[in-house]
Image: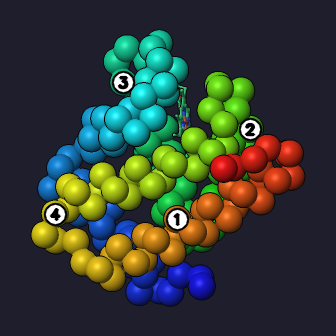
Amino acid sequence: MSLTEQEKQLIEKSIERVADVAGDPASHVYARLFEQQPEMEALFVLDTDGKARGHMLSEALDCVFDYLGPRAYAPVLIQSEMTNHDGFGIPPRVFATFFNVVMETFRDLLGDEGTSETDAAWATLLGEFDATIAEHAAKSGTAVV
Ligand code: HEM
């Protein structure tokens, strides 16, 4: 099922509210990522000031906003970053987990503000991203799971 206008608004609103209630969410997102995928932490060893991590998260969120709005580049960005990340040693299976980590972190940061409608909207979005990732992985001959 594709995203409705209402679902798009719920996702946008949740991202904006995270900035209001928690400021920059990067430290929370990467703490959760490294808890779930400990072997990924070493890949950021050169990122001593956290700038690359911050930039990556902001690009991933811009990608979400583009996907919910004009959809001018999001699917292409996901595909090209999959290829770049494969070069960093991040297989599609792991790449696919990032947006899920973002969603889980934001849900935690929003706490009681979160609703089942917002959770369902994110689930639809992540399903669509997973499909884009699986399609690209299949084309390039790599497995997602
Ligand atoms: C678990 C999944 C992911 C991991 C482990 C990961 C890891 C990395 C690593 C190690 C770098 C290089 C950092 C450096 O230069 O020191 C990087 C850069 C980057 N990643 Fe990811 N990535 C993931 C998912 C994603 C996703 C889903 C996107 C967006 C579609 C994305 C966008 C970027 C961008 C734009 C950069 C360049 C940032 C910069 O150099 O300033 N990444 N990522």
Residue on which disc 4 sits? 111
**Are the residues at dot 3 and dot 4 in contact (C-beta closer than 8 Å)?**
no
Amino acid carrying mark 4 in the image: Gly
Query: What whole-number distance in Å separates the C-alpha atoms at marks 3 and 2?
Result: 22 Å
Dot 3 falls on a residue whose secondary structure is: loop
Q: Which mark is residue 83?
A: 2
Mark 3 Cβ inside 8 Å of ligand 1: no
Q: Earlier in the sequence, mark 2 or mark 4?
A: 2
Q: Earlier in the sequence, mark 2 or mark 1?
A: 2
Q: Position of residue 38 (x, y in %)?
A: 42, 28
Dot 4 falls on a residue whose secondary structure is: helix
Quadrant of the snapshot with the N terminus:
bottom right
Judge whether residue 26 can be spotted in this image.
no
Q: Nearer the viewer, mark 3 or mark 4?
A: 4
Q: Position of residue 14 (x, y in %)?
A: 30, 67
Query: What whole-number distance in Å separates the C-alpha atoms at marks 2 and 4?
Result: 35 Å
Query: What whole-number distance in Å separates the C-alpha atoms at marks 1 and 4?
Result: 20 Å
